[in-house]
Image (spheres, rainbow, N blue to C red):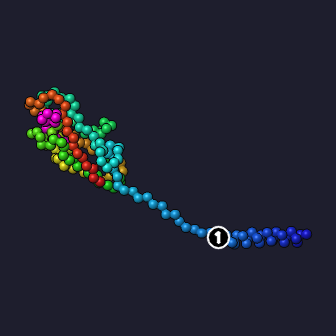
């Protein structure tokens, strides 16, 4: 009887080994791909047009003011913020405004819509000594993937004969990276 059990066990082992011998293993790979393109955000927003680079608000002045100073502030109230892909070199080009050259005393002008203009300029320093010309460029350091603050200032100059009212201008801006 023992021989019969031993033969059965050996036959079972033989079948198991035969089953394993017939199994095969195939190996391979999966290729995964992600392509990243350079990108930037302005004041936390991404896009290709219509971005809000900020506003330059000279506040409320009397019609006889001498000068009014302001800084370009983003929607959150802080300085303009540019966040670009690591390794890019962002540059901001401040293009033409709607009323450039309409008033002596500045390269740009705020208008009241009735033919009256307040001259003003952009500056890259708080002391208002480095004028940023029309189509002037601010080149930022190479991005490390951390938001960079851009300080841009403005100074408006009063002149005799200005009527009370709201004076505005819209200036085009480009970001290249």
Quadrant showing the N terminus: bottom right
Label 1 environment density (alpha carbons within 10 Å; few <14, some 14–19, many ≥20): few
Judging depth in this view, the residue of 32 and 122 nearest the camera is 32
Q: On screen, 74 above or below 145?
A: above
Judging depth in this view, the residue of 50 and 19 nearest the camera is 50
Question: Which x, y percent locates residue 7?
Answer: 84, 72
**Residue 176 in view, yes or no:** yes
Q: Is residue 73 left or right of residue 164?
A: right
What segment is highlighted magenta in the picture?
111-123
The quadrant where residue 45 appears:
top left
Question: Which x, y percent locates residue 70?
Answer: 22, 36
How many marks the image carries: the answer is 1
Q: Secondary structure at mark 1?
A: loop
The stretch drawn in magenta includes residue 113 = yes
Question: Which x, y percent locates residue 132?
Answer: 18, 46
Question: Which x, y percent locates residue 106?
Answer: 12, 40
The stretch drawn in magenta includes residue 118 = yes
The residue furthest front is 114
At horizontal 17% and vertical 29% (from top left) the residue drawn is 165
At horizontal 21% and vertical 47% (from top left) the residue drawn is 94
At horizontal 11% and vertical 39% (from top left) the residue drawn is 103
At horizontal 57% and vertical 68% (from top left) the residue drawn is 27
User: Mark 1 = which residue?
Assistant: 24
Judging depth in this view, the residue of 6 and 49 nearest the camera is 49
Q: Secondary structure of the magenta portion, mostly? A: strand
């Amino acid at each position: 009887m023992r021989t019969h059990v031993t033969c059965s066990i050996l036959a079972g082992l033989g079948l198991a080994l035969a089953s394993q011998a017939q199994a095969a293993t195939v190996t391979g790979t999966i290729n995964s791909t992600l392509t990243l393109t350079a990108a930037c955000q302005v004041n936390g927003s991404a896009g290709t047009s219509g971005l809000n680079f900020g506003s330059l608000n000279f506040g409320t002045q009397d019609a006889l003011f001498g000068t009014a100073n302001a800084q370009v502030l983003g929607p959150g109230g802080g300085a303009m913020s540019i966040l670009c892909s690591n390794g890019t070199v962002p540059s901001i080009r401040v293009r033409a405004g709607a009323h450039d050259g309409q008033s002596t005393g500045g390269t740009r002008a705020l208008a009241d819509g009735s033919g009256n203009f307040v001259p003003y300029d952009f500056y890259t320093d708080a002391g208002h000594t480095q004028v940023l010309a029309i189509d002037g460029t601010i080149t930022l350091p190479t991005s490390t993937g951390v938001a960079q603050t851009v300080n841009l200032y403005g100074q408006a100059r009063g002149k005799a004969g200005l009527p009370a009212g709201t004076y505005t201008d819209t200036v085009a801006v480009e970001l290249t990276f």
